[in-house]
Image: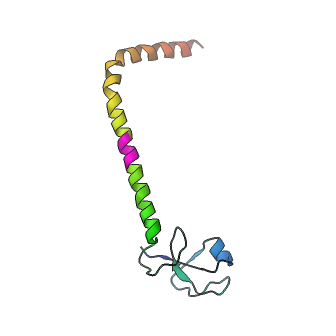
């Protein structure tokens, strides 16, 4: 994916609101500053325009992705660990649920 083009003038309205521009634009329509390729996340100037994120943001994104994967795996392990216990108590759970439904129906 290609990087965004954006204004790097910190006083410009386009910089403050993080407006991105198409490839054909060379200068900012608000302040006249030359547009640069910027990171989609932190708006740092990029040396190359072939990536949307700078190195720091791409590493941070990968770390968050790995953390999400670990949470899903740990949740799955917890469910698998509890499943045999629930299965052994299924009759009690069904009886309790039936009683709860009867109480709710009476109200």
Q: Pick whichever, 105 or 62, lies toward us.
A: 62
Q: Position of residue 57 (x, y in %)?
A: 47, 66
As for residue 71 lying within the magenta part, the answer is yes
Query: Would you place residue 29 above or below residue 68 in this image?
Result: below
In terms of image quadrants, where is residue 25? bottom right
Most prominent secondary structure in the magenta stretch?
helix
Quadrant of the frame with the N terminus? bottom left
For the point 56% across and 88% down, the residue is 26
For the point 54% across and 69% down, the residue is 42
Residue reaching furthest to the front: 56
The range drawn in magenta is: 70-74
In terms of image quadrants, where is residue 81? top left
Query: Would you place residue 99 above or below residue 51 in this image?
Result: above
In terms of image quadrants, where is residue 19? bottom right
Q: Position of residue 79 (x, y in %)?
A: 36, 33
Q: How many marks?
A: 0
For the point 30% across and 25% down, the residue is 84
As for residue 32 lying within the magenta part, the answer is no
50 vs 10, left or right, is left
For the point 50% across and 15% down, the residue is 100
Q: Pick whichever, 89 or 98, lies toward us.
A: 89
Q: Position of residue 52 (x, y in %)?
A: 46, 72
Q: Pick whichever, 88 or 47, lies toward us.
A: 47
103 vs 85, left or right, is right
The structure's colour scheme is rainbow
Q: Position of residue 13 (x, y in %)?
A: 68, 75
Query: Would you place residue 14 above or below residue 68 in this image?
Result: below
Quadrant of the frame with the C terminus? top right
């Amino acid at each position: 994916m290609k990087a965004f083009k954006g204004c790097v003038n910190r006083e410009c309205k386009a910089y403050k609101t993080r407006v991105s521009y198409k490839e054909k634009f060379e200068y900012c329509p608000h302040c006249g500053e030359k547009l640069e390729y910027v990171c989609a996340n932190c708006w740092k100037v990029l040396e190359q325009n072939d990536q949307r994120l700078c190195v720091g943001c791409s590493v941070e994104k990968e770390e968050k992705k790995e953390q999400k994967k670990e949470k899903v795996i740990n949740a799955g392990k917890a469910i698998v660990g509890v499943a045999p216990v629930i299965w052994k108590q299924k009759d009690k759970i069904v009886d309790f649920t039936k009683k709860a439904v009867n109480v709710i129906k009476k109200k």
